[in-house]
Image (cartoon, rainbow, N blue to C red):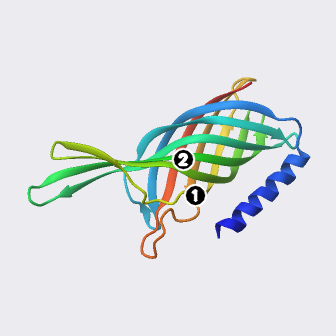
Amino acid sequence: MKKPILTCLLLFGIICFAHAQRPIFAAKGGVNFADMAGPNGDLSDMRTSFHAGLLASFMLSEKFSFQPELLYSSQGYSEVFLIEEPIATDFNADIKLSYLTLPVMFKFYILDGLSIDAGPQLGYKLDENVKYDAANISDSFDSDEYNDLTVGANIGFTVYPGEKFFLTARYNRDLLSNVDSNYDEQYNSVIQLSAGFYF
C-alpha cells in the first residue's frame, strides 16, 4: 500500500518541479498540538511540542505554487489513567515520537496575502520514548510500538503579513494506521502553528 503512494508522490513532484520557476527558500518553526486518534475519535490527551525546518517554494503560476518541506517534528501524546491496585493512584504517561517529515504542499492563492494549502506528507520516525510518573516514581525508556514510516495528509492556510514573513496554520493526520495490528488502529493527529521567513 505504501509503495504505490510513494511512487505517485515522487512522479507528481517531478512533474511539478519541471514546470516550476526558480525556487524561493525559507525557514520555519512553531508549535505542535499532537495527539493519537483512532477510528472513533481521539484516544488520548494532546501533547504540546514543536517543529522546525526548511522549505522551497516553486511558483507554478500566479495563483498556484508547489512547496516541499523538510521538518523535524516532535509529536506523540499524553495519557492519564487510574491504577486501582494495590493502592489507587494516577498513572501519567508522556509518549514522545520524533519524526523527520516531508510535507509536499500545493498552495492556491485565493487573495493577495492569503493561500489555502493542502498536500501529502511522509514521515520517518527518529525516536520513540515513554516517560511516566506514578506514585511519586518517575522514569523513562525507549520503545518501538509505532511504525517507522508514516503517510499522512495536510490541510491549512498561510497568511503573508510582509514580503519576507509568513504565518501558517495546518492540520495533519496519518492516512494509514501507525501500528501493525488487526485489532487496533492509531493515527498521528497534529495541529501545527508556524512562523517563517524567506531568505
Q: Amino acid at mark 1?
A: Thr
> From what the image shows, is residue 135 above or below residue 38?
above
| Secondary element type, mark 2 | strand
Dividing the picture into quadrants, the one containing residue 158 is top right
At horizontal 44% and vertical 51% (from top left) the residue drawn is 35
- The CA span between labels 2 and 1 is 9 Å
Q: Residue furthest bottom?
A: 182
**Is residue 129 rendered to the left or right of residue 106?**
left
Please, what secondary structure does the residue beneath circle 1 have? strand
Does the CB distance between marks 2 and 1 fall below 8 Å?
Answer: yes
Query: Mark 1 highlights which residue?
Result: 150
Give residue 148's position: percent from left, percent from top: 54, 57
**125, above or below 158, in the image:** below
- Tell me what residue is drawn at x 81 percent, y 57 percent: 12
Dot 2, how many residues are within 10 Å of its Cα: few (below 14), some (14-19), or many (20+)? Answer: many
Residue visible at 11% across and 61% down in the picture: 85
